[in-house]
Amino acid sequence: MSVSTGLSYLAIPGPSVVPDRVLRAMHRASPNIYEGELVEMVPGLIEGLKRVAGTQHHGAIYITNGHGTWEASLINTLAPGDKVLVPATGSFAHGWAGIARSLGIEVEILEFGKRAPVDPAALQARLAADSAHDIKAVLAVHTDTSTGIRSDIPAIRGAMDAAGHPALLMADCMASLGCDRFEMDAWGVDVTIAGSQKGLMMTPGLGFVFFNDKADGARDRLERVTNYWDWRPRTNPDVFYHYFSGTAPTQHLYGLAEALAMIEAETLEGVWARHGALAQAIWAAFDHWGSAGPLEINAPRGHRSHSVTALNAGSDKATALRKWCEAKAGLTLGIGLGMAEAGTPEWHHHFRLGHMGHVNGHMILGALATIEAGLKAVDLPHAPGGVVKAAEHLADAL
Ligand SMILES: *Cc1c(COP(=O)(O)O)cnc(C)c1O
């Protein structure tokens, strides 16, 4: 039998849980896109997004997913033949690098493997060696969703400054915006990209690109920026449709407005603190389970994301655990991504827990208790009582 009937919980690292409030806000007849409420609402939405990103500069909304924002960030700043440096701590850095290559951009990967953050000293050394300043941008992923590793963006900025290097700093905050502390302007980031479907608690479909005047200046020397991706009309529109290079994403914008209102009500500091406390509860559980068995959090301590945890089960039982949790208890865990080749036995060693956006104490404690039941059911060796450690952590922390 199963006990899965009831509220199901999609605990994968995006798309994340969409609050009922947001869904209800989207459930409406199509609004007029030429005048009225929707048209008047958009400038305020962009200001709200900029507050979440910690920037006073420019913000553009695209009807796209994260891949589209990867492309938008590059098309507006780099020309074919330009070179970028990509410090890599997982699959998503390689994904961004692949988009750059497809645009004719020369890519150099600075590889840190799957279990370590970006090392600022290595980055500084590489940039210092580039005395001709051939490298035009550093593409840094804040939280790599495949490995659960969060890199230190201020330290990356510091490395670039210490090397005296003028490259643009671009940050992929798809998995971290609205989860982990991020302050674009204070941290000296020139371009930030994010999307609607992770920490921002919305359905997939909206991509966000924030940029400062230095990044916009890089656009001046480009021969061509394709019309759809051009961020200038979107941030300085002559007519309303320029915001989206066409029809506005009508119902999505109402959902986004509701999600931003929820973040403002909780405050950004409150949102960050909630994600931090829940992440620590999750680590307490997994570290305890793993104290008597092979189960292990992939990311090293001190470099763990507050929005996603990647796990190694140490055997091929991760897939059985995922399937048990979903079929028996209504909890969907994420597959491992980029940790092992699909089709190999090792692929079944990995899974991920998404804890981004609309998550709270009882959801996380419920998910952890379900996982503990699953560990026992699939006979994955572990120290019983991880849930108690998580509960104790929250009791103390709150
Ligand atoms: C999810 C994600 C992306 C890609 O987003 P898509 O919407 O799947 O295109 C890019 N970077 C990071 C860090 C992500 O977590």
Image (cartoon, helix red, strand yellow):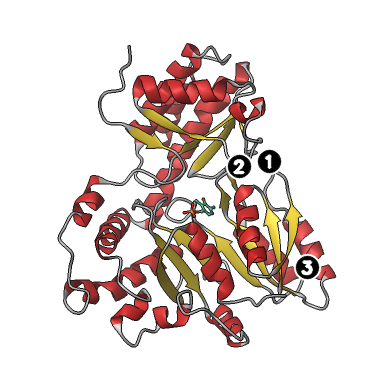
SS label for mark 1: loop
Question: Which residue was labeled with disc 1?
Answer: 115
Amino acid found under the numbered disc labelled 3:
Leu
Residue 173 in the image: state x and y as whole percent. 51, 57
Amino acid found under the numbered disc labelled 1:
Arg
Residue at point 62% right, 34% down? Answer: 342
* Nearer mark to the viewer, of 2 and 3: 2
Residue 76 in the image: state x and y as whole percent. 55, 77
Residue 166 in the image: state x and y as whole percent. 70, 77
Residue at point 28% right, 54% down? Answer: 262
Question: Which residue was labeled with disc 3?
Answer: 127
The dot on residue 196 is none
Position of residue 89 in the picture relative to residue 207 (left or right): right
Q: Quadrant of the C terminus?
A: top left
The dot on residue 147 is 2
Q: Quadrant of the N terminus?
A: top left
SS label for mark 2: loop
Whether residue 182 is visible to the viewer of this picture, yes or no, is no
SS label for mark 3: helix
Q: CA distance from mark 2 to mark 3?
A: 25 Å
